[in-house]
Image (cartoon, grey):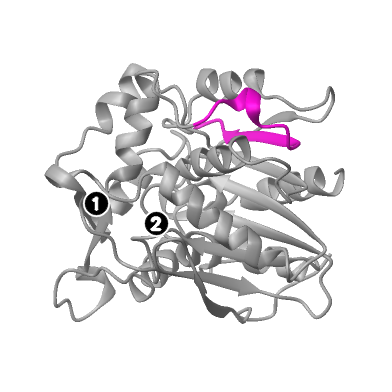
Amino acid sequence: MPTETGPVPATAHDIAGPAGTLRVTEWRPEKPTDGVLFVHGATYPGRAIFGSGLDGPSGWGPWTMTRGDAAFALDVRGYGSSHAVDPGPDDEPPARTAAAAGDLAAAVEWATDRVDRLHLVGTSWGTLVCGRYLATRTDPPVVSVALHAPVYDLSPAVRDRLAFDGPFRTVQRDGARARWAAQAPADADTDRWLAGFDAFWSTYVANAGSVVDDATDSTTATVRVPNGCLADILAAADGDTPYDPAAVETPALVVRGTADHTSVRPDALGVYDRLGGAPGSNAYAEIDGGTHFVHLEPPRERLFDLVRSFQRSH
């Protein structure tokens, strides 16, 4: 089994997107054949969510590199080190799913020049972005897609939690940690479950292009996040979905953590049941005890192994 003896080096690339410069972080082994392009969720950009230097097994991007595949983490417009966004008319929230899918298309085109085969992994809102991209393009150059923690047809309880006001929202350390800790399984040691939080948060602030205060360190920073993602997640809950899973013919794995209170089982199974593609090409799985942040939690290697096994089967 490959091991990591220290920080895995990352390379930042600025590529041309449909509306401005996009940041893609790459972790690259010497001679990759396959590549995995990761698409983040509604709040945290790719470098932080997939590449933080966590305890034990590292983030998903570096872990992928140590298994011999190239890993690419996209920052959608308005996130991380990608170009900033402005509100639309009447303060319409920016960075909607259709626009993010355009950013993903640019990243896919760039990444396919660097590897022979490309897989997608989307998490949370990133599953809507991946779904939109795959459902609206003929013959996309993608071998497989993992839809991790999908949000498609929200339960009423989840919908009520995601209300927003204005084109942007702000994120601070204590609130982010509290929201994550509230999901930890009832019998879990919260400090152990969130052992990677400090590394994740410092990586987030260091790679956030929209820190909106003069904080002297990451613990007191405030980061601005576009609300286009929430507008589309809520619209999907009302029936105005950004894509139809039946139009996704790329082999797809739907996976969630059993303690995930945002991507609930009926929603994830609903996406799985609607998927297109050839018989036998799709799969569904759950990670015991994982929350919406299972990719940063103690069970994360089981998630990584599961997704990699699905990728290898295609």
Instruction: Give the residues in magenta.
Output: 243-259
The one of 137 and 125 positioned closer to us in this rendering: 137
Image quadrant where one finds the N terminus: bottom right
When the figure is inspected, residue 103 is found, relative to residue 115, above or below; the finding is: above
Label 1 SS: helix
Residue 189 at x, y = what percent? 46, 47
The one of 70 and 300 positioned closer to us in this rendering: 70
Cα distance between the residues tagged 1 and 2: 14 Å
Q: Are marks 1 and 2 in contact (CB under 8 Å)?
A: no
Image quadrant where one finds the C terminus: top right
When the figure is inspected, residue 94 is found, relative to residue 27, above or below; the finding is: above
Instruction: Answer whether residue 245 is magenta in the image.
Output: yes
* Mark 2 surroundings within 10 Å by alpha-carbon count, few (fewer than 14), some (14 through 19), many (20 or more): many
Residue 212 at x, y = what percent? 17, 68
**Residue type marked 1:** Gly
The mark nearer the N terminus, 1 or 2, is 2
Give me the residue at 48% from left, 41% from top.
124
* Mark 1 surroundings within 10 Å by alpha-carbon count, few (fewer than 14), some (14 through 19), many (20 or more): few
Instruction: Answer whether residue 209 is magenta in the image.
Output: no
Residue 280 at x, y = what percent? 84, 25
Query: Is residue 299 visible to the viewer in this orientation of the structure?
Result: no
Give me the residue at 37% from left, 46% from top.
180
When the figure is inspected, residue 296 is found, relative to residue 287, above or below; the finding is: below
Give me the residue at 54% from left, 78% from top.
13
Residue 173 at x, y = what percent? 26, 60
| Residue position marked by numbered label 2 in the rendering | 44
Q: Is residue 95 left or right of residue 160?
A: right
| Residue position marked by numbered label 1 in the rendering | 175
The one of 47 and 143 positioned closer to us in this rendering: 143
